[in-house]
Each structure stands twice: as C-alpha cells, then as structure tokens.
Image: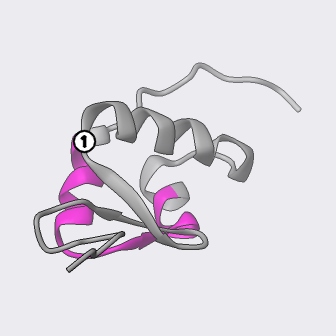
Amino acid sequence: MKRGLRKPIDYKRIYDLLKDGPLTWKDIREAAGVRNSHVLRVIDGLALRYPIWQPGRGVYALLDGTDKQNDTE
C-alpha cells in the first residue's frame, strides 16, 4: 500500500462532536479520517487536550460535573 502524506487531525472538530454526546470508536475514526489501527492515537491526543472518559466499551464522552464514576454518597 502506498503511503501518503499525513493529514493533521482536527481535534477541535471531534471535541465539538463530543459536546453533542458520546462518540463510538467508529464515529471517531470517521471524524478523524484515520484507519482503525490509528483511532487509539486519536483518542490519546484528545485526552491530552480535553477531559474525556470511556463510559462503556468503545464509547467516549466528555467528562463534566454530572458524570460520576465513583459516587460515594
């Protein structure tokens, strides 16, 4: 397979999509325009810039004040 130039990932665009609700692995792959094997790199890049978490397997969402992983009340 012929390798082309890498296109920059638009993390802001994916962040804006996350504002509307959780995204799946496939949603992130399509939004970033990368192969399936590179989605984890995109997710890592997002996590460095924005507060995201994984509420379920293959699902990613923004972490805000209403999301509580360990509610101790």
Q: Residue 7 at what x, y percent from top left?
A: 48, 27
Residue at the spot of label 1: 50
Q: Callout 1: few (<14), some (14-19), or many (20+) C-alpha neighbours within 10 Å?
A: some
Between 20 and 2, the residue placed more toward the observer is 20
Q: Quadrant of the N terminus?
A: top right
In this view, the residue farthest toward the top is 5
Q: Look at the picture and state if 38 lies above or below 18.
A: above
Res 45 quadrant in image? top left
Secondary structure character of the magenta stretch overall: helix
Q: Which residue is drawn at 20% across and 80% down?
A: 73
In this view, the residue farthest toward the front is 73
Q: Residue 56 at what x, y percent from top left?
A: 52, 75
Q: Total marks drawn?
A: 1
Q: In this view, does 73 lie to the left or right of 65?
A: right
Q: Is residue 26 part of the magenta span, yes or no?
A: yes
Between 5 and 59, the residue placed more toward the observer is 59
Q: Look at the picture and state if 35 lies above or below 54.
A: above
In this view, the residue farthest toward the bottom is 73
In this view, the residue farthest toward the left is 65
Q: Is residue 58 part of the magenta span, yes or no?
A: no
Q: Is residue 55 left or right of residue 68?
A: right
Res 19 quadrant in image? bottom left
Between 16 and 68, the residue placed more toward the observer is 68
Say what amino acid the circle numbered 1 marks. Answer: Tyr
Q: Residue at x 34, y 74 (%)?
A: 22
Q: Which residue is drawn at 35% across and 70% down?
A: 70
**Secondary structure of residue under mark 1:** loop
Residues rendered magenta in the picture = 12-28
